[in-house]
Structure formats: structure tokens, C-alpha cells
Amino acid sequence: MTYSYPLTMPSTPKCSNADWTLKRCQAKSFSSFTGLHQFIDHPGKWWLCTLKYPPMTLLQAQDWIDFLMKLHGQIGTFYLTDPDGNIKRGNPLGTPLVTAFGSDRLSVTTYGWTANKAGLLYPGDWISFSNYEYKRVVESIVNSDSGGAATIYFEPIMRVPLAGGTAIATTSAKGIFHLESHDVAWTTDNLMMYGLTLAIMEELS
């Protein structure tokens, strides 16, 4: 049987811990003669996350186990929103769209915001694009000008810059992830309470 990926994760219970890592591919060259070193920043960057769930009843666990079985190890993908991602510091008013990405692919000029609004997004807020690249706002508060335009600085780097007019998700930002391992495991005790921890990685294709 084939499934329509990405899947949607079960909604309950909510995870009790989420451990995030921004993975970077960097190299360091070091001269043993001069002591000088040089860092090389390769373009590969992605999110890793470990989700830990509270004890589950049998009925709750069955939904999660069914979800994991349907992923077929690392082959299947699913949507993920940071469990704290819906708690935003900013107030994103309007319907933001892409104007163009910066040459460094770490910023995007946008339009479609409500005009002359301060604090649309704050550092730490999440955004995503139509290809579900999942980004975290950095550096500065996002404010719109009189024409409803604004610039967003984010991390990590945009892998595939998108065309102008592409929508930007703010209140419902999410990424696409897959399991870090093709093996699936869970625990159960003599009270039939289940435990589950998921190590996941952002989908890069």
C-alpha cells in the first residue's frame, strides 16, 4: 500500500520536550606552521529535532504506532510545527508574499503586509514557504512600510529560492521532516503505559 506523503502527525498527546539542533556543514583548515586557521562554510544546513512524549495510554499509543508504521522508516515524510511555534512574539498582519530573496539567501523582501505596522515578526518567530522550507526569524524586528513591504532575515539559508508572489506562512508555519533512523521503537510497562521518543530530520529533497 502506498501513502500520500507528507503525513499529518497525531495531535495527542503533545510532546513534553523538543530538543532542536541547527546542523551546519563546516570545515576548518589549520596551519601547524603559522597557527592560522580558516573556516569554510558549506551550503548544507538543516534542522534536527528530538521529540519526547509523555506516557501514553494504549489507545493513544496505537495512533502513534500506526503513524510510524506508515512512514516506512526514513522513506515517508510528515509535517512538523515547533510545539512552541504558535506562540509568536510578533503580530503578523496581512498576507505576505515574496518579492525576491537576497543574494546570500538569508533574507527575503516581501509585500502584502498591512501598511505601517511595527512588530509583525520578532527574532525567534517561525516562517515557512510553499516548499515548506522551515525558517526562524533572526536579527531584527520586522516592520512594514507605507506600501506594506518588509524585509525578513532568517536562518538557515534558503535552499531553493522561490519566485516572486510565493506565499509566506507565518501563523501556520511548518516544515517537512522524516525519521533519522529506519528503525522504529517504543516502550511499554506493566501498566500498559507507552513511551515514545522520535529523532527526526528536516527533509532536504
Image (spheres, rainbow, N blue to C red):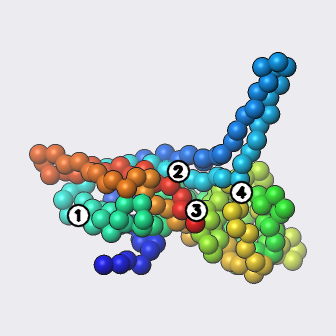
Q: Nearer the viewer, mark 2 or mark 3?
A: 3
Pick the front one: 122 or 174: 174
Quadrant position of residue 175: bottom right
At horizontal 42% and vertical 67% (from top left) the residue drawn is: 76
Point out the residue furthest to the front here.
33
Dot label at residue 112 = none
Point out the residue furthest to the bottom here.
165
- Left or right: 20, with 193 as reference point: right
Q: With respect to residue 105, does 194 lie above or below? A: above
Q: Which residue is mark 4?
A: 157
How crowded pointer 3 is (Cα within 10 Å; few <14, some 14-19, many 20+) is rated as few
Q: Nearer the viewer, mark 3 or mark 1?
A: 3
Identify the amino acid type marked 1.
Gln
Q: What is the x, y in percent for residue 130?
A: 63, 75
Point out the residue furthest to the top here.
33
Q: Secondary structure at mark 4?
A: loop
Identify the amino acid type marked 3.
Leu
At horizontal 81% and vertical 58% (from top left) the residue drawn is: 104
Quadrant showing the N terminus: bottom left
Point out the residue furthest to the left here.
190
Q: Which residue is mark 1?
A: 62
Q: Earlier in the sequence, mark 4 or mark 3?
A: 4
Identify the amino acid type marked 2.
Leu
Q: Which residue is mark 3?
A: 204
Q: With respect to residue 19, does 30 lie above or below? A: above
Dot label at residue 48 = 2
Q: Nearer the viewer, mark 1 or mark 2?
A: 2
Q: Earlier in the sequence, mark 1 or mark 2?
A: 2
